[in-house]
Amino acid sequence: SSSSSFSSSSSCLFALKRRRTNHRNLASTKVQATSFMEIAQLGLDLDRNTVGPAVFAIATLGVSWVFYDGSMQMKQLKEELDSRGVDSSLFNKLYELKYIKRALDSGDQSAYDEAEERIQWQRSKIVVATGSITEVQKIKKFWQTKGIEVKTLADLDKVEEYMVEKYGGKAIKF
């Protein structure tokens, strides 16, 4: 009987020690978890206060750089085209300037003529439908040099016939 009471008291004692150890581990875990949560909360506070404005500032710099770089490329291309005897005022988009430069670099005058006409054809569609009077006058003047009178949106069919007849209706690839 004494051995059974000893074994039951020893198992109780062992269980009590295990409970204390688990309680200590649990308490330690709670302290660690609490510390981690405090650090995480501090991190969240930093995110709320600094990351948003930092992301905004970086995005603003990125967008500004894209516009600055594009304007510098346009300026450089316009100067180069002007020095080569091309009226760069006819082209006001970066992809148009690059397209014209590639045509000039090919060394073939007909490639330049085709590029110029394709750009003006593309622009005509937009300008006649939605453009300002000044832009419409530029388009009319350009196509008059080719023998085509453009007064209305319906007159663009004449321009399209001219382009299909001259270039075979190939798709424009700027």
Image (cartoon, grey):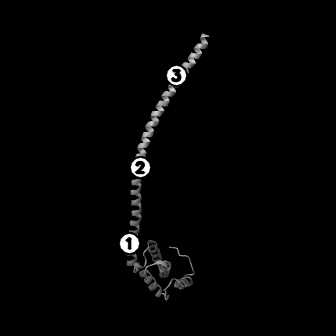
> Dot 3 corresponds to which residue?
17
- Under tag 1, what secondary structure? helix
Q: Residues within 10 Å of mark 2 (few under 14, many from 20)?
A: few
Q: Is residue 145 visible?
A: no
Q: Which residue is farthest top? A: 2
Q: Position of residue 136 (x, y in %)?
A: 45, 82
SS of the residue at dot 3?
Answer: helix
Q: Which residue appears at 48% of the width and 27% of the height?
A: 24
Q: Classify 5 as above or below 167.
A: above
Q: CA distance from mark 1 to mark 2?
A: 41 Å
- Residue 150 appears left or right of 61: right
Instruction: First in sequence, mark 1 or 2: give its number.
Output: 2
Q: Which image quarter: residue 138?
A: bottom left
Query: What percent of the width, then of the height, locates residue 64?
Result: 39, 63
| Residue 35 can be seen, yes or no | yes
Q: Which amino acid type is marked by label 3?
A: Lys
Mark seen at residue 75: 1
Q: Amino acid at mark 1?
A: Lys
| Amino acid at circle 2 | Arg
Residue hosting label 2:
48
